[in-house]
Amino acid sequence: MAEIGIAIALAAVLGQLRLFVMPQGGSVSLELLPIIFVAVRRGVVPGLTAGLLYGLVQLLLPGAFVYHPLQAALDYPLAFAALALAGLVVVRGWRGLGLAVALAVAGSLAFHFLSGLIFFAEYAPAWESPWLYAITYNLLYLVPEGVLTVLLLWPLLKAYDAAFPGRQRGAG
């Protein structure tokens, strides 16, 4: 429970340190890192708890954009809860870590995509279909954030393993 609380607090701070901000919401930061760390280290249920709670906390932070209650649910608690999918992968190397983060980002993308398609299709240029706009828009910030997460999560997991050698990582 303490790790989940710390992960939520870290995600909140890291989410405010944005490298890039998209015009209708979404940004490149390191907020995924602590939530995915919990999912990889502790499994799906703790990752789901951390992601869901962080999504609710994020609604209270500056920069949250609520257009409709369903949009808020899709873009915040559900999208961040989907990061728990990283806990399904047993991470034993770069490939496993890449797969875990890709699965987490894909789950989050699904909710952001639905939100974009349902609530933000009007922003799509006339020459682009709304579904293509929604997926492209969200990939523009989720892919860089996923890459940063993989690059920084690997040394963090190694440091954690060195500090706590008796604890095993695993899916669950």
Image (cartoon, grey):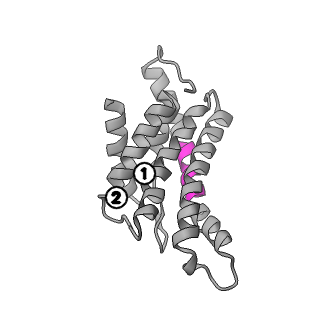
Total numbered labels: 2
Are the residues tagged 1 and 2 within 8 Å (C-beta)? yes
* Residue interval drawn in magenta: 142-152
Q: Residue at 58% of width from left, 49% of height from top?
A: 107
- Whichever of labels 1 and 2 marks the residue nearer the N terminus, that label is 2
Residue 142 found in image quarter: bottom right
Circle 2 sits on which residue? 59
Quadrant occupied by the C terminus: top right
- Considering depth in this image, is 130 or 69 the residue closer to the camera? 69
- Pointer 2 local density, CA inside 10 Å: few below 14, some 14–19, many at least 20: some
Against 168, is 117 above or below? below
Position of the N terminus, as image quadrant, is: top left
At a point 64% along the width and 67% down the height, the residue shown is 136
Give the SS element for disc 2.
loop
Q: Which residue is mark 1?
A: 77
Residue 100 pos. (x, y %): 61, 38
Is the magenta region chiefly helix, strand or loop? Answer: helix
